[in-house]
Amino acid sequence: MTRPEPGAAETARRVFALGLEPVLAPALVLRSLPVAPFPPVQAVLLPSRASARALPLSDTPIWAVGEATAEEARRRGFRQVRAADGDAASLAAAVAATLDPAAGPLLLASGRGYGRDLLAALRGAGFRVIRRAVYAAGDADALPEEARAALTSGRVGQALFFSPRSASCILRLLEGAGLASRVAGISAIAISPRVAAVLSPLPWREVLVAPRPHQDPMLELLRRP
């Protein structure tokens, strides 16, 4: 599983509950950033669970990219939380359909270097959008030893990929470790077609794409023993 912590541990518990052995290989390392005070806004947009974890608590209404991010925001104490359908396009469409550009600016709380498509879509719809980087994501330097051993011994039958960047990082790590050929026996499960496209250079046994950009449909694609 290539999801970064702390989400990787939660996914691992769910995989274990299905009767499968999870092997963690987080592709990215996340760290929260100091967030400068921002002016009054009509809503805060959260494009990821990492954004929800890093954003300082406030009473401002929240629009989350999907239900998992909305649940994370509620756990953090945010009270006015609504969810889109799981990707940036659905978040932009939901915001454009429910909010008025004349009612004030929006705050996009994203990772450093992320959120450009969402920003462009909302500004194209007439909104003033303030973007704040609330966390940074760095590429992992190497595969964990447990993951290397599992790949070398052929114990990995399926792999979960949650973002284009994490998929790209894992490909680089596999090639650097001389393990790229080992994926021929692995089914890759991608959260979206964009992620599947990043995975295409390696000879996976198959690449499956979740019918919806959520973790639950990805887990439904896992083969039980």
Image (spheres, grey):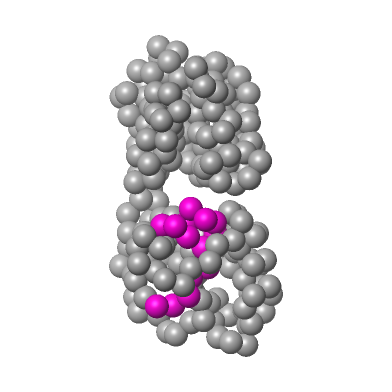
Q: Position of residue 211 (x, y in %)?
A: 66, 41
Residue 60, placed above or below residue 203: below
Q: How many marks?
A: 0
What residue is at 52 percent from the left and 34 percent from the top? 219
Specify whether 164 is left or right of 37: right
On whether residue 66 falls in the magenta region, the answer is yes
Specify whether 56 is left or right of 214: left
The foreground one among 197 and 208 is: 208
Q: Quadrant of residue 54?
A: bottom left
Q: Quadrant of residue 198?
A: top right
Residue 28, placed above or below residue 55: above
Residue 49, placed above or below residue 6: below
What residue is at 36 percent from the left and 60 percent from the top? 75
Specify whether 28 is left or right of 196: left
Residue 141, placed above or below residue 34: above
Quadrant containing the N terminus is top left
Q: Position of residue 216 (x, y in %)?
A: 53, 41
Q: Is residue 55 visible?
A: yes
What residue is at 48 percent from the left and 41 percent from the top? 166
Q: Position of residue 110 (x, y in %)?
A: 46, 62
Q: Position of residue 104 (x, y in %)?
A: 55, 85
Specify whether 110 is left or right of 210: left
Q: Which residues are magenta?
A: 59-72
The foreground one among 199 and 217 is: 217
On whether residue 107 falls in the magenta region, the answer is no
What residue is at 42 percent from the left and 71 percent from the top? 79
Q: Quadrant of residue 20?
A: top left
